Image (cartoon, grey):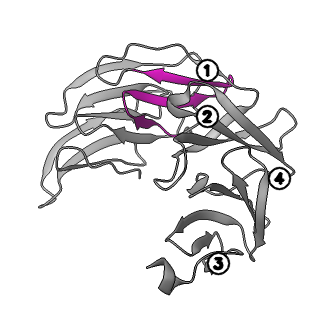
Amino acid sequence: MDPSDPADILVFGTHIGELVAVEASSGKLKWRYHATRPGANCESRTSVASDGVNVCFLAKDGFVRCFDAKSGRELWNRKPESPAATDLLVYKDGLYFGTTDRHIHSIDPANGSPLKPLQTAYSPVGGIAESDKTAPDESEYVYATTADGRGALISFSDEFHSVQWSRIADAQWSSIAPEPWGATVIAGNCNGDFVAYRVGNGEPGWRGHVEGCITGFTHDASTLFLAVQEGALYSYRPPGAPSRKNAE
């Protein structure tokens, strides 16, 4: 399930291929769209993203579909030539996603008009992250897979105009998405290793290790929190981080 909350409506996708919109305050059903078609790949990626007016859905049949958030009226649909391999991201004026043919695609969410795709050296995969609000510059980050199966992290200039840097790791990243945190972006793998890369040049900063396969991150001003597949939750304070009292 991947929820979005446009126009006071909670919109989410289900495991059976539906897009459901409910009233956020009451849970009352507003509209429902069943997107699965015969031959749809049940293992394919699904995702929901919104700009507050339109809501876009990556369905199991491979189509990207955008709807009017209030009425549920379908505005347009488009099937990429190569399968989508990342989540959808609505950011500023564009709808973005990566495909298996090593491209980041940009589409106008209001009418489905495609903009020029950006080619990458590696195949993007997983969640797309925007830079932290305290970062010095606006950027986007996405995991990727190299031709020989290793993990990579790619940094893009604002609105995916160009690739700023990329870094290859020995193992594939396992967390849902990179975690931008101030002047760093953090990636974690299934060996329990995580690395904070400097957003300006992609050079590794500090590193850490926990027991388990890392599935996700979040943070406050002073502390990084990590969830692992085995069910544990860790808190980690990197070298030089302010104390919680000072951070508040």
Q: Are marks 2 and 1 in contact (CB under 8 Å)?
A: yes
**Residue 189 position in % (x across, y down):** 74, 59
Query: Label 1 amino acid?
Result: Leu
Q: Determine whether, in the image, residue 245 is placed left or right of residue 241.
A: left
Amino acid type at circle 4 is Ala
Q: Position of residue 146 (x, y in %)?
A: 81, 36
Quote the CA–CA distance across marks 3 and 1. Answer: 36 Å
In this view, the residue in front, 158 or 186, is 158
Q: Is residue 232 visible?
A: no
Q: Is residue 222 above or below residue 144?
A: below
Q: Amino acid at mark 2?
A: Phe
- Closer to the N terminus: mark 4 or mark 2? 2
- Check disc 2 and report the residue beneath it: 156
Estimate how packed mark 3 is, as few (under 14), some (14 to 19) or many (20 or more) residues with alpha carbons within 10 Å: some
Q: Which residue is mark 3?
A: 237
Q: Is residue 219 above or below residue 184?
A: below
The span picked out in magenta is 87-107
Q: Nearer the viewer, mark 2 or mark 1?
A: 2
**Do callouts 4 and 2 mark residues in contact (Cβ within 8 Å)?**
no
- Disc 3 or 1, which lies upstream in sequence? 1
Give the image location of residue 136, x and y in percent: 55, 48
**Residue 118, which numbered label?**
1
Q: Secondary structure at mark 1?
A: strand
